[in-house]
Image: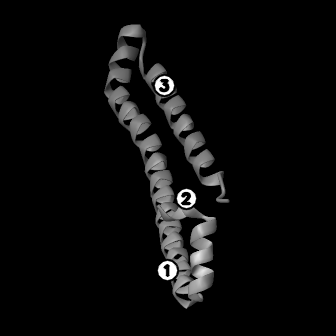
Amino acid sequence: MQSKTGPVLIGLAYLGLVVFIMLFCADQSSGFDDYSKYWGLFGTLVGVATGAIPSFFFKTQADQADQKAKDATDKASKEASKAQLFAVAAEPAAASRVVEENPQLFQ
């Protein structure tokens, strides 16, 4: 299992950045009108970063899931090949008995 420290630190750093921007805007303004002008300047950047951070983590998870699916497909293919090799090596009487006992597998 992978460590969750990196995403937590990035989330806290981002939260700290947003709080810093809010406090900076409040410090530089004398009223709500000035504050809204400053926030309007930084709001777009905050919005883009808010969208980019989750998409990065979802992409990472999707890549990991894709790799796990590929590994499972490769393993299933190898197991199917082994089963075919064992079936070829079996005696004809034993092979026909397996087919008779498991007809649902050979439809």
| 2 or 3: mark nearer the eye | 2
Instruction: Say which residue appears at 40% left-offset and 42% top-offset.
Output: 52
Instruction: Name above or below for residue 41 compared with residue 85.
Output: above
Mark 1 vs mark 3, CA separation in Å: 62 Å
Q: Position of residue 58 (x, y in %)?
A: 47, 46
Instruction: Name above or below for residue 51 compared with residue 105.
Output: above
Mark 2 vs mark 3, CA separation in Å: 66 Å
What residue would you read off at disc 2? 104
| 1 or 3: mark nearer the eye | 1
The answer to whether marks 2 and 3 mark residues whose Cβ atoms lie closer than 8 Å is no
Q: Position of residue 39 (x, y in %)?
A: 38, 22
- Answer few, some or many: residues within 10 Å of disc 2's Cα (few below 14, many 20 plus, some between 14 and 19): few
Q: Earlier in the sequence, mark 2 or mark 3?
A: 3
Mark 1 vs mark 2, CA separation in Å: 20 Å
Q: Quadrant of residue 8?
A: top right
Instruction: Say which residue appears at 56% left-offset and 90% top-offset.
Output: 89
What residue would you read off at disc 1? 81
In this picture, residue 25 sits left or right of residue 99: left
Instruction: Say which residue appears at 44% left-offset and 23% top-offset.
Output: 25
Name the disc covering residue 22, or none: 3
Secondary structure beneath label 3: helix
The answer to whether marks 1 and 3 mark residues whose Cβ atoms lie closer than 8 Å is no
Q: Earlier in the sequence, mark 1 or mark 3?
A: 3
- The three-letter code of the residue at mark 1 reads Ser
Instruction: Say which residue appears at 40% left-offset and 32% top-offset.
Output: 46
Q: Position of residue 107 (x, y in %)?
A: 47, 61
Q: Position of residue 68 (x, y in %)?
A: 52, 62
Name the disc covering residue 49, or none: none
Q: Quadrant of residue 49?
A: top left
Secondary structure beneath label 1: helix
Q: Which residue is more in the foreground, 95 or 5?
A: 95
Instruction: Name above or below for residue 51 compared with residue 107.
Output: above
